[in-house]
Each structure stands twice: as C-alpha cells, then as structure tokens.
Image (cartoon, helix red, strand yellow):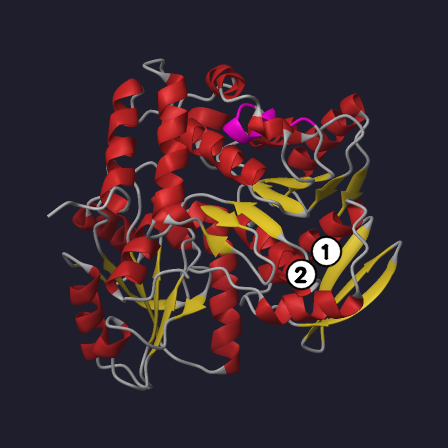
Amino acid sequence: MTLPRSGAGTIGAIQARLLALHSRRIDLSLTRIERLLAALGHPERRLPPLIHVAGTNGKGSTVAFARAILEAAGERVHVYTSPNLVRLNERFRLAQPSGGRFVGDDELADALSECEARNGNAPITVFEIETAAAFLLFARHPADILLLEVGLGGRLDATNVVEKPIATVITRISIDHRDFLGDTIEAIAAEKAGILKVGVPAVVVSQPREALAVIERQAARVKAPLAIAGEDWTATEEHGRLVYQDDDGLLDLPAPKLYGRHQFENAGAAIAALRAGGLKLPAPAFEAGMIRVDWPARMQRLSQGRLASLLPAESELWLDGGHNADGGRAVAAALADLEERVSRPLVLIVGMMSTKDNEGFLRNFTGLARRVITVPIHQDKAMPAPALADIARGIGFPTIARDDVEGALLVAGQLELEPAPRILITGSLYLAGEVLAANNTPPE
C-alpha cells in the first residue's frame, strides 16, 4: 500500500529535519528569515493589508475578536497565530468568502517543503520556517486583511519583517520569557515596542507605568500615533454589556463571548485597531463579533467530551492556558466572578513548565481554590508534578500529584465537596492542547 504524501507524519518529518538545522533553543534574529524570504522571492511584500499584534497576554484573544468582527462584516481574513494547541495547521488560517479555514495538510506540507528546500542546510529555527511558510500561503491566497500575531517579543521576532502594517497593537505586558526578553518590565516593553513602525497608528492597552513610558518613547522616535486605553479609547462593562468609546463615537455591544473581565479590554483593543487602521465597518459587525468570537483554551467551558464525561453531571469543567503571573491574575478574577454568580468549591488541576514563575502563578488562587492537583506536561522543561505539588503546598494549598489529567479528574470528582466542584485545568497552553486532544474536542 502506498502511503499518502501528506498528513501529520509528513509535516512532522519536515519539522524533525528542521530541528537538526538549529537547536530548540530560541535565538531571536531577523537575519535568517530575511535571507530565506529573499530566496523565496519576498512573499512578505505581497501580503494583504495587515494588523500586527504583540504583547505578553491577550494577543490571541485580541486577534480572535478582530477576526470575528471582520468576518461578520464580510471581509476575507488570513490569520497567523502561535502556538497551536493540537495540530500545527491551527497556526495558519486562510481566508474564505464565508469565514476562514485551517490550512490543509497537503498545502502546509508543500509550503514547508518549499521553504526547507530554499533554505538548504543553513541554520534556521522551526518558527522562522513556519513564518516564511505562512507568508507564502498568505501571498498566494486572496484576502482583504491579515491578522499577524508576534511569536515572541517583537523587535527580533520573525514576523517583524513586515514593513508597513495598517495598524499595530500592544496588549498587556508583564514579566515572561526572561531568558530572551530581559529581567525587567522596561526591557520586555522595549522588545514589544519594536513592532512600532514609522507613521503607523498603534493601539496600546492599559500597561504598567514603566512599560507605557517605554512604548511612548519608542512611538515618539518613529512618529507612530498612539491610541492608549483609558486616554484615547475605553472599553468597559456596563450593565452586562460592552461599552466602547473613542473619538469616532460610542458602541454599545453585547458582552464578549470569551469569559472574563480582561476580555472586555481585549475586545476594545481589537475595535480600536480596526478603527485606527482606517477600516469602516458597520455597527452590526461589531455586535456579531462579540457573540461569534471563539478562541479555545481561554476560560473555555468543557461541557462535552471524553474527559468531561468522567465527572459528576453537576460539576463544571473549565480550561485555560494561562501560564504566567499576570495571566493567572486574570483567570483568578474570572473565577471570582463565577463564584459570585454561582458558588462552587474550586479545584485546580495544574501543569506548568519549569521555565515559568510557578509560585507567582499559583499565588493568584489563594482564597479561591480548595484543592490543587498537579499533573505532568509531555514537553521538554516541564515541571515534574511532585515538584509542582511541593510549591503549591508551600503556598498553603492542600495538594496531591497525579500521573495524568484523567487520574486528576477522577480524584477531583470523588472529593467530598458540596455542591459539586468547579474544576479548572490550567498552567500551560501545552497542557491545554493535551486536554483538548484527550477530550476529543480539538480546535475547528
């Protein structure tokens, strides 16, 4: 029997070969991708108008809101995001007349193979090859707009080869990826602000004072007009609705479908970016976007699926990929709001990478979580579940470690808690991807 040329195996084989050209260690630089894009005939110069999004937390949600609004207005939208949760294809969403689609296996394998061939044996990272493949795909398919999410940082991120976006966005900045971006909020902000372009309007969400000062200085250097949350635009919750206002007027919209008070500002950033980019969209598109938006593993309720079926019917199962202290703060606030609406004992199932601030993340849930159950993640540099349990116990949580999520859910379901518990699986997007795969509910 002849095996099909495409499929996950082929894509995986390409990735494996690329890893041999460059170690898994992140090495931020534009030199390698610029060389490859030149060999490919500069597809990055043939992209549709684009919005470039950087930040520590909220990038993907902001992109999701913008996509939902644009597609509700009938626009054809390409989207590039990372990381993927279950399949690499999720990073590449190609525009369609009635909504987008993930790139197919054949098409993705062909694009990756073309980039691999043009690169030869020169050193390059897998993300750089993937970004070059994305630009190839986006240049070859018609679209009205591209939403481009930074992978890591901004200034030296592979996506930052684009020269003239219609707008840039900087979402919430916090301490993360210290090894690559710096140990201070100012250093990290400087890397994120590296996406600002000469004369291109930039939307900025509320930031720590030190981060905002860095962004403002860089914007002044490149003469990029800033639209800052709380100064030039606002997005607030009023009577269960999202009220957005800027110099162009007021929008009274449904509450965002993505749960959590932090999503009001992410939705506002998307609206502000679309307006700053000069896109004239009808008010009904903004309304529909709030209702239709979808972004898996961000306070996602898992009410069906194999893992969900392991729990008593009265329980709630939630999933969130938050993995740094600031992200944990947003998730904890969302859980506190849920507790105020419907009180349930909270059980956390947590898996984290050893490179993250595990203690800082977990401390957000003091006073909220009754029990913590730690699990491993099947990734390099994952924190062993027993070691993570020791950290949680040191904070004061009653904690046990289990070998997998299924075992943790069985323990959570057997706890003598009244009423039935609210269970949140959190701590890493890698873990979230494993959960969605095991639950048979991958992103679609």
- Residue tagged 1: 271
What stretch of residues is rendered in magenta? 156-163
Relative to 228, say whether 37 is above or below. above
* Residue 96 image-quadrant placement: bottom right
The three-letter amino acid code for the residue at tag 2 is Ile
Q: How many residues crowd around disc 2 within 10 Å: few (fewer than 14), some, or many (20 or more)?
A: many
Left or right side of 287 for 370 = left
Q: Residue at x 57, y 47 (%)?
A: 78
Residue 126 locus on image (x, y percent): 36, 29
In the rendered image, residue 217, in percent from the top left (x then y), is placed at: 75, 26
Contact between labelled residues 2 and 1, with CB atoms less than 8 Å apart: yes
Element type where label 1 sits in the image: helix
Give me the C-alpha separation between circle 1 and circle 2: 8 Å
Q: Nearer the viewer, residue 184 or 263?
A: 263
Quick one: 199 or 137, which is closer to the camera?
A: 137
Residue toward you, 164 or 406: 164
Front position in the image: 381 or 308: 308
Circle nearer the N terminus (1, 2): 2
Give the residue number, with chain letter if any, for mark 2: 69
